[in-house]
Image (cartoon, rainbow, N blue to C red):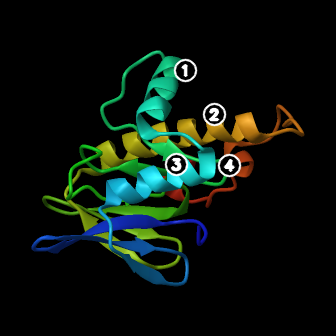
């Protein structure tokens, strides 16, 4: 694991699945589809297979999510479309600085000044962000052996960027 991913973006190449993994200061080209990378992250960091993780999260939230975010104790990622679709982008909501709505897309701007266009409206992205923050909080709480004061803000507890989008 190389640190906190900001986004995992599919690269379209005939007969070759690859992704660009965006980090704070660099980009890595990985010869795997985004969902494969997400599953490996979940397996390496949380020692859990995606189907089991999805079922457990669904049990905790009392509903079955179609677009289940993934989380570890440090950050979360949420999908922009069906999780195993080769064109799905995975975004880290805790590092999103702003969402700029355009005609048929939303520009997602990250705290490191990286920006990308996503073919989803901002309301849908904000909903994905909320689900991902919830998943992150659940997983982080499971790892937290020190306990957290009840007055700790969610932004502070999750150690995420304070921006207009994350404070909503």
* Label 3 crowd bin: few (<14), some (14–19), many (20+), radius 10 Å: some
Distance between the alpha carbons at the discs numbered 3 and 1: 18 Å
Q: Which of marks 2 and 3 precedes in the sequence? A: 3
Please state which of the two labelled residues, at mark 3 or mark 4, is closer to the viewer: 3
**In the image, what residue occupies the spot 44% across and 74% down?**
22
Along the viewing direction, whichever of 88 and 131 lies nearer the viewer = 88
Distance between the alpha carbons at the discs numbered 3 and 4: 18 Å
Q: Which of marks 4 and 1 precedes in the sequence? A: 1
Please provide percent x and percent y for residue 149.
87, 35
Image marks 3 and 4: residues in contact by CB distance under 8 Å: no
Relative height, residue 141 to residue 80 (above, below): above
Residue 138 marker: 2
| Residue of label 3 | 42
Q: Is residue 28 found left or right of 71 in the rendered image?
A: left
Image marks 3 and 2: residues in contact by CB distance under 8 Å: no
Dot 3: element: helix
Q: Which of marks 2 and 1 precedes in the sequence? A: 1
Does residue 76 appear anywhere in the picture? Answer: no
Along the viewing direction, whichever of 95 and 21 lies nearer the viewer = 21
Image marks 1 and 2: residues in contact by CB distance under 8 Å: yes
**In the image, what residue occupies the spot 48% across and 58% down?**
92
Distance between the alpha carbons at the discs numbered 1 and 4: 19 Å
| Residue of label 1 | 60
* Residue furthest to the right: 146
Distance between the alpha carbons at the discs numbered 3 and 2: 14 Å
């Amino acid at each position: 694991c190389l640190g906190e991913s900001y986004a995992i973006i599919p690269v379209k190449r005939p007969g070759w699945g690859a992704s660009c993994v965006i980090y704070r200061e660099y980009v890595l080209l990985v010869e795997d589809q985004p969902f494969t990378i997400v599953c490996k992250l979940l397996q390496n960091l949380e020692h859990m297979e995606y189907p089991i993780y999805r079922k457990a999260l669904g049990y905790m939230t009392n509903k079955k999510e179609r677009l289940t975010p993934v989380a570890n104790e440090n950050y979360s990622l949420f999908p922009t479309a069906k999780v195993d679709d080769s064109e799905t982008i995975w975004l880290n909501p805790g590092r999103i600085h702003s969402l700029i709505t355009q005609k048929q897309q939303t520009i997602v701007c990250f705290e490191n000044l990286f920006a990308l266009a996503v073919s989803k409206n901002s309301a849908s992205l904000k909903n994905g962000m909320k689900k991902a923050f919830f998943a992150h909080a659940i997983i982080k709480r499971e790892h937290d052996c020190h306990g957290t004061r009840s007055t700790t803000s969610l932004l502070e507890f999750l150690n995420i960027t304070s921006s207009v989008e994350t404070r909503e």
